[in-house]
Image (cartoon, rainbow, N blue to C red):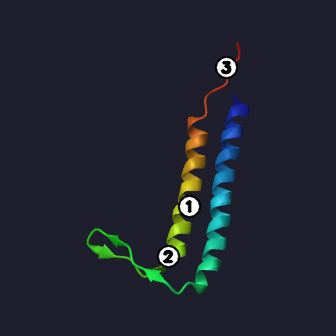
Amino acid sequence: MVRELLLRLRLLSLSFGAGLLLLVVLCLGAQNGRDRQEIQLGATRSVPLPSGFLVGLSLVVGIVSGGCACAVLMPEQRRD
C-alpha cells in the first residue's frame, strides 16, 4: 500500500518537475521570438505571444497532464 503511494507520488513529482523545467527553458528561449500570435478566447484576445511559446506551452501541459493521468490511473497491485 505504502509502496504504491510512493510510486504514484514519484510519478507526480517527476511529471511536475519535468514540466517546470521545460517551462523555464521555454520562457528563456521565447525571448527572441519575432513572430507573435494572439489567441482568441471567447470575446477577448490574449496578448501577442511567440508562436513557438504557444506550441511549447501545449507540450508542457500535455506532459504534466499525461503524468498525472498515469499516476491516477495506475492499477493497484494485489497480493494474494
Residue 59: numbered disc: 1
Q: Separation of disc 3 and disc 2 at Cα?
A: 47 Å
Instruction: Report the residue at 60% width, 48% height from top.
Output: 67
Q: Residues within 10 Å of mark 2 (few under 14, many from 20)?
A: some
- How packed mark 1 is, by other alpha carbons closer than 10 Å (few <14, some 14-19, many 20 or more), is some
Q: Is residue 48 above or below residue 63?
A: below
- Mark number for residue 51? 2
Q: Is residue 46 left or right of residue 6?
A: left
**Residue at the extreme top of the image, as rendered:** 80
The N terminus - image quarter: top right
Amino acid type at mark 1: Leu
Q: Position of residue 11 (x, y in %)?
A: 67, 45
Q: Secondary structure at mark 3?
A: loop
SS class of the residue under badge 1? helix
As shown in the figure, which amino acid type bears the numbered disc 2? Ser
Few, some or many C-alpha atoms within 10 Å of disc 3 (few <14, some 14-19, many ≥20)?
few
Is mark 1 in CB contact (under 8 Å) with mark 3? no
Residue type beneath disc 3: Arg
Disc 2, SS: helix
> Mark 1 vs mark 3: which is more N-terminal?
1
Whether the residues at callouts 1 and 2 have beta carbons within 8 Å, the answer is: no
- Location of residue 56 by image quarter: bottom right
| Residue under label 3 | 78
Q: How many marks?
A: 3
Q: CA distance from mark 1 to mark 3?
A: 34 Å
